[in-house]
Image (cartoon, grey):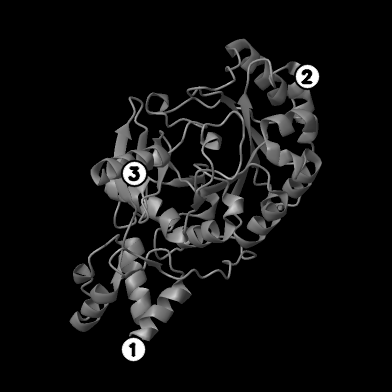
């Protein structure tokens, strides 16, 4: 099926990221920005298209392997540029097949990415920030303060790292190990929109990584004004972290609700362009024992969703050290799901994946802060 014609890539073109040795990283550049770099080298525009193919379709990192480029151009590229991904600090494998990577950026900051294999798909969960802008009380990532936004190259680089690890180059035309992308890792994507949009535009490009927008989901805690922009410019699937049906409770669980209350959030969801095409919005709802899991809560949720093509993901709370909540009982979750299903909405209970490696929903938190303290401590010891 052809992609909808109403969407256009955002006009955001970040400059190249400069690596420690002073060379510029070509990963993360838009087609237009890559073309400008090639033009600055005195080369013809079609060379940029060839370079794009090597980087994003074949996954090549060595300019010498780009045999359609002349030796002179390869030498110029190697002198001034690199094709770099984040470095893998640690890779963990769960008993259920889930894989988690702790990735280090050029400045030493770290984030986590997770690959979840299923029978009909392979979903990669990517991060958008080091730490998080928000302080959702049930989320482990929210206990780590925001350090900085990730650049476009660092976001698309997470996809490339996963495909490196899974041996999925060149980009396959059939079944894929990385078939779906969810921007649900560390951070609030809509508070880093330009970099997220730039990265997703690259991921969706049909001549490169080539993952359809219908297989990409952007998750937000409810930045209502940016929801409309994301729908107009990207048209990917939308997932909204709802987790409560009253402003009073949601503001306690998710302080962002004080800025964008439920009524404003739901209005933005109704305006999301894909809704007009009956593509469902996913509402994420973490099940917290005695907090948001009553039959009355379920009935109120149904009323909130009226008129929105929607699916509700019920997420059993995944514990983490120091958490103030418990997971709802199986009986409470079953009763809640039954009420939502009876109203005509799909309400699957998400099976926890990767809990043994702290890779489940709400458990991601990089160790960069602790690691930096350790390194600084070692440096002070050496200096003493």
- Where is residue 175 shown, x and y percent of the image? 37, 46
Q: Provide the residue designation for mark 2.
A: 296
- The foreground one among 325 and 343 is 325
**From the viewer's perspective, is residue 300 above or below residue 204?**
above
Q: Is residue 309 in view?
A: no
- Where is residue 274 shown, x and y percent of the image? 67, 52
| Marker disc for residue 191 | none
Residue found at the very far front of the displayed protein: 384
- Where is residue 373 shown, x and y percent of the image? 37, 40
| Marker disc for residue 42 | 1
| Disc 2 element | helix
Q: Provide the residue designation for mark 3.
A: 376
Q: CA distance from mark 2 to mark 1?
A: 67 Å
Image depth: mark 2 or mark 1 in front: 1
| Disc 1 element | loop
Residue 262's quadrant in the figure? top right
Which image quarter holds the C terminus?
top left
């Amino acid at each position: 099926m052809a992609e909808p014609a109403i969407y256009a890539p955002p006009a955001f073109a970040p400059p190249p990221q400069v690596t420690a040795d002073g060379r510029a990283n070509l990963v993360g550049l838009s087609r237009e920005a890559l073309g400008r770099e090639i033009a600055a080298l005195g080369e013809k525009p079609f060379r940029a298209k060839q370079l794009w193919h090597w980087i994003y379709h074949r996954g090549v990192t060595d300019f010498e392997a780009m045999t359609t480029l002349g030796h002179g151009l390869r030498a110029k590229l190697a002198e001034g540029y690199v094709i770099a991904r984040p470095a893998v600090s640690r890779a963990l494998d769960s008993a259920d097949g889930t894989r988690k990577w702790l990735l280090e950026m050029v400045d030493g900051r770290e984030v986590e990415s997770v690959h979840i294999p299923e029978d009909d798909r392979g979903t990669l969960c990517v991060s958008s920030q080091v730490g998080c802008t928000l302080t959702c009380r049930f989320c482990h990532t929210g206990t780590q303060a925001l350090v900085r936004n990730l650049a476009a190259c660092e976001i698309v680089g997470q996809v490339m790292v996963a495909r490196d690890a899974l041996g999925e180059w060149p980009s396959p035309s059939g079944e894929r190990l990385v078939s779906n992308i969810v921007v649900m890792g560390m951070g609030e994507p809509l508070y880093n929109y330009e970099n997220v949009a730039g990265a997703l535009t690259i991921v969706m490009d049909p001549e490169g990584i080539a993952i359809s927008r219908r297989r990409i989901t952007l998750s937000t805690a409810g930045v209502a004004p940016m929801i409309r922009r994301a729908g107009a410019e990207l048209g990917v699937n939308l997932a909204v972290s709802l987790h409560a049906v009253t402003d009073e409770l949601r503001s306690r669980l998710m302080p962002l609700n004080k800025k964008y209350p439920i009524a404003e959030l739901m209005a933005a969801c109704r305006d999301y362009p894909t809704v007009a095409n009956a593509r469902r919005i996913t509402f994420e709802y973490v099940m917290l024992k005695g907090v948001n899991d009553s039959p009355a809560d379920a009935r109120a949720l149904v009323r909130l969703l009226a008129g929105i093509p929607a699916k509700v993901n019920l997420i059993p709370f995944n514990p983490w050290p120091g958490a103030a909540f418990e997971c709802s009982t199986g009986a409470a979750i079953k009763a809640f799901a039954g009420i939502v299903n009876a109203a005509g909405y799909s309400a699957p209970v998400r099976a926890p994946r990767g809990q043994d490696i702290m890779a489940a929903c709400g458990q991601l938190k990089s160790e960069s802060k602790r690691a930096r303290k350790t390194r600084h401590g070692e440096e002070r010891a050496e200096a003493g």
